[in-house]
Image (cartoon, rainbow, N blue to C red):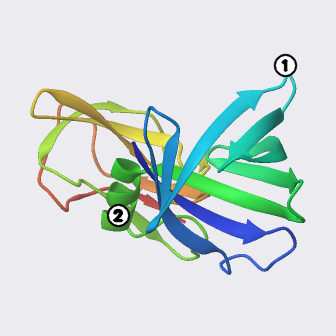
Amino acid sequence: MKYIATITPTGAPVGTGRTMEIEIEEDGVVRVGDQTFQTDLTRIDDLDLYSLLLDNRSYEVHVNQTERAAYRVTVSGGGYEGFEVRIVDERTHRASLASGGLGGQSGDSAVKAPIPGLVIKVLVTQGDQVQVGQPLIILEAMKMENELRAPRDGVVATVKVKPGNSVNQGETLVTLH
């Protein structure tokens, strides 16, 4: 499965992180950009603590979820500091780009239909506070349900559709402040 991760060192200004594509295979192989790593990740008890073997080197990784799709990660054993990591799957990333980009923006953002379809559910109303990655609309296309998620934190300014509406690709469904 492919993911898009934005990694920002703790304390660094917002928007200064590195974005990279990560592909995770079932056999523990992880590809980060053009590099490949053999990994083994094991959770320690019920803690937010993991043991990570990365190419036969051992690391202790502490992970706290800070908000939907964002994590504070501290790695020891390699001289690393803490990081904030935002992760979205490849499909959500493409949909976010089509709707105005991922989190960290200011101003209004339009969440647009990435494909033509039928609105099944509207999960927000005008004035709702939303966080990056929060589901806003369920759109059915080609007999599959697609969750359209908030590209950033914000407040719902307008909801332009209701369940049962047919929409075209690129049509604005929700706008955020």
Quadrant of residue 143 in the image? top left
Viewer-nearest of labels 2 and 1? 1
* Residue density around tag 1, few if under 14, some if 14–19, many if 20 or more, within 10 Å: few
Kindly identify the residue that appears in the image at 78 percent across and 80 percent down: 13
* Left or right of 74, for residue 168: left
Please provide percent x and percent y for residue 165. 17, 38
* Left or right of 107, for residue 166: left
Please provide percent x and percent y for residue 145. 25, 30
* Residue density around tag 2, few if under 14, some if 14–19, many if 20 or more, within 10 Å: many
Q: Is residue 107 above or below residue 165?
A: below
Residue 99 circle label: 2
Kindly identify the residue that appears in the image at 79 percent across and 52 percent down: 73
Q: Is residue 98 above or below residue 120?
A: below
* Left or right of 147, for residue 172: left
On the rendered image, what quadrant is the C terminus found in? bottom right
Q: Is residue 8 visible?
A: yes
Q: Is residue 128 visible?
A: no
Q: Which residue is mark 1?
A: 46
Quadrant of residue 172 in the image? bottom left
**10, 173: nearer the viewer:** 10
